[in-house]
Image (tube, rainbow, N blue to C red):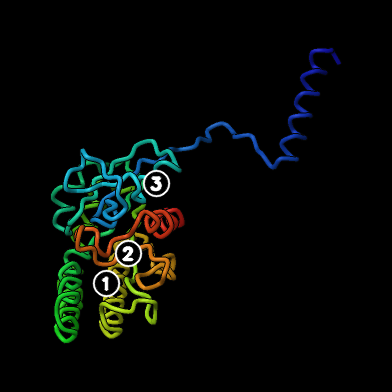
Amino acid sequence: MKMSRLVAFSSSLLLGVALALTGASVATAGESVQAVDYVALGDSYSSGVGAGSYDSASGDCKRSTRAYPVLWKAANAPASFAFTACSGARTGDVTAGQLGPLNSSTDLVSISIGGNDAGFADVMTTCVLQSEATCLSRVATARGYVDSTLPGKLDAVYSAISAKAPSAHVVVLGYPRFYKLGGGCLAGLSENERTAINGAADYLNAATAKRAADHGFTFGDVTPTFTGHEICSGSAWLHSVNWLNIGESYHPTAAGQSGGYLPVLDANA
């Protein structure tokens, strides 16, 4: 064997041994790593209201650099990233103004939507300011809306996403329970009110998960990641009512975005 061939053979043998020991492998011809084109849609839970550090260019949409879509982008370096989630968005706002970046090349879409349609901001305002009976009645009205009207509105959003991005993997993120029952809050809402509000969040999540599944989407349940970090837990990842910044009330903190939402998107993306 000529010296040049011997050197080449030895080099190949050493490389093979090294790869075997490290568990590495050599990509075969035609194999490639495809980068992800990611679009983040939704309401204030996706835009990052409550997490601070808002992008001034996003205006009233209050898109935070600490929101879970931005954190996912930083960790995964997608080929492209569009962030159109907006504070206060309802289902109609998504279809009317957030779907522009979607196209046939979009690989991943995340979205949280439906809470504003169901009137959860008004539910919380009612429960904080009015009687327990009025609070429970308002919660019941929200649940009725989830039964009668919300499914059709979610269908419209999900169908529009599929039409514009037919190849995308869509992850629908839910909402956390707000309160730890039997927790450390000594004032504020009654335990009956907290129980009703938590139940309404579960009810909304169940309806959303059903619609997502029927469209072939993945539902990401954040209830487990927020467990132990609800209001009244002593380690809350959610803002309680804040009269100085009412818009951030009952929204995730920066820790809620990174510890509550990001792991769920990671697990389902």
Q: Position of residue 262 (x, y in %)?
A: 41, 54
Sequence-wise, the earlier of marks 2 and 1 is 2
Is 227 positioned to the left or the right of 146 in the image? right
- Which label number is shown at residue 174? 2
**Cα separation between marks 1 and 3:** 26 Å
Is residue 2 visible in this depiction of the protein?
yes
Under mark 1, the amino acid is: Leu
Are the residues tagged 2 and 1 within 8 Å (C-beta)? yes
- Which label number is shown at residue 71? 3
Q: Residue at x 17, y 43 (%)?
A: 59
Q: Position of residue 126 (x, y in %)?
A: 15, 75
Q: What residue would you read off at disc 1?
A: 204
- Circle 2 Cα neighbour tier, 10 Å, few/some/many (<14 / 14–19 / ≥20): many
Tell us which disc is closer to us: 3 or 2. Answer: 3
- The residue closer to the viewer here, 61 or 24, is 61
Is 87 positioned to the left or the right of 30 in the image? left
Tell us which disc is closer to us: 1 or 3. Answer: 3
Which type of secondary structure does the marked residue at label 3 adopt?
A: helix
Sequence-wise, the earlier of marks 3 and 2 is 3
